[in-house]
Image: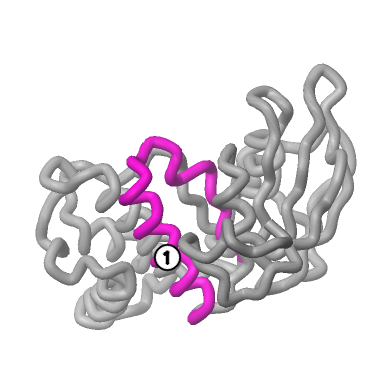
Amino acid sequence: MNFRIERGEFICIIGHSGCGKNTILNVLAGLERATGGGVIMDGREIDGPSLDRGVVFQSHALLPWLTARQNIAFAVRSRHPEWFRQQVDAHATRFLDMVGLSHAGDKKPSELSGGTKQRVGIARAFSVEPKMLLMDEPFGALDALTRGVIQDELLRIWSATHQTVFMITHDVDEAILLADRIFLMSNSPRARLAEIVVNTLPRDRTRDSLHHDLQF
C-alpha cells in the first residue's frame, strides 16, 4: 500500500467489506501500527493518536451525559487547555452553528436524532481544527434525505476550512459527489490499492445535477 494525499484534498476510499479500508484509516489515525513502513505527515512519522488527526466514526461516539455543546467543548479543551471557559464555549458554539445546530446545543444525545448526532460528531472533529479529518463511513446508518443534508454540510465546512479529508464509503455516488480522488481497493484475500480515479467533474456539482453529467 503506497499513496500520497495533498494538503486540503478530499479523498474517498471504496472497497468490499474486509478489504482493509478500516485498517488503513486506523493506521492513518495512529490507532493501529502498519505491519511495515510507516505514515509521514508534514515531514514527521505518525506514532499514535494525535489532535492533528480528527476521527468521525460510523457511530456518533458522543458522551451521553454531556449536551451537544459540551461534547464539542470537551474536544476544544483538549486542543486549547489554556483557554478560558468563555473562549471554549464561543468556539464550540461557532462549530455548532456551522452544522446548523445552534438550536440543539443544550440537548443531550438521547434527545437527538441519528443524523443530528452525526452532525455534532462532525462539528466536534472540525472544532479541534485537525490537519486531517478521518471519516469511517459516517453516513452509513442514515436515511437518504438526512444523508444528503449532511453531505451538503460537510462540503460547505470543508470548503470553508480547507482541511484534508480521508473518508471511507460504500456509496459510489457519494464518492463522486464529495471526492477529488477516489481510491479503489481490490478484493481480499490479496487486497490492495487497485486504482486511483481522479474526479474530473467540476466542483460545483450537486446531488441533483450529478447524474445528468455525461462524465458521471
Residue 22 falls inside the magenta stretch: no
In this view, the residue in front, 6 or 15, is 15
Left or right of 84 in this view: 157:
right
| 87, above or below 45, in the image | below
Which portion, as a residue range, is magenta?
A: 132-160
Residue drawn at the location 39% of the way across and 55% of the way down: 148
The spot of residue 105 in percent (x, y) is 16, 64
The spot of residue 155 in percent (x, y) is 49, 68
Q: Quadrant of residue 16?
A: top right
Query: Can you say which quadrant of the picture contains the C terminus?
Result: bottom right
Q: Mark 1 points at which residue?
A: 152
Left or right of 62 in this view: 104:
left
Query: Can you say which quadrant of the picture contains the N terminus?
Result: top right
The spot of residue 53 in percent (x, y) is 58, 59
Work out which residue is located at the far top of the displayed protein and give it: 189
Amino acid type, mark 1:
Asp
The spot of residue 12 in percent (x, y) is 65, 52
Residue drawn at the location 20% of the way across and 81% of the way down: 86
Residue drawn at the location 16% of the way across and 44% of the way down: 65
| 161, above or below 115, in the image | below
Residue drawn at the location 65% of the way across and 46% of the way down: 30
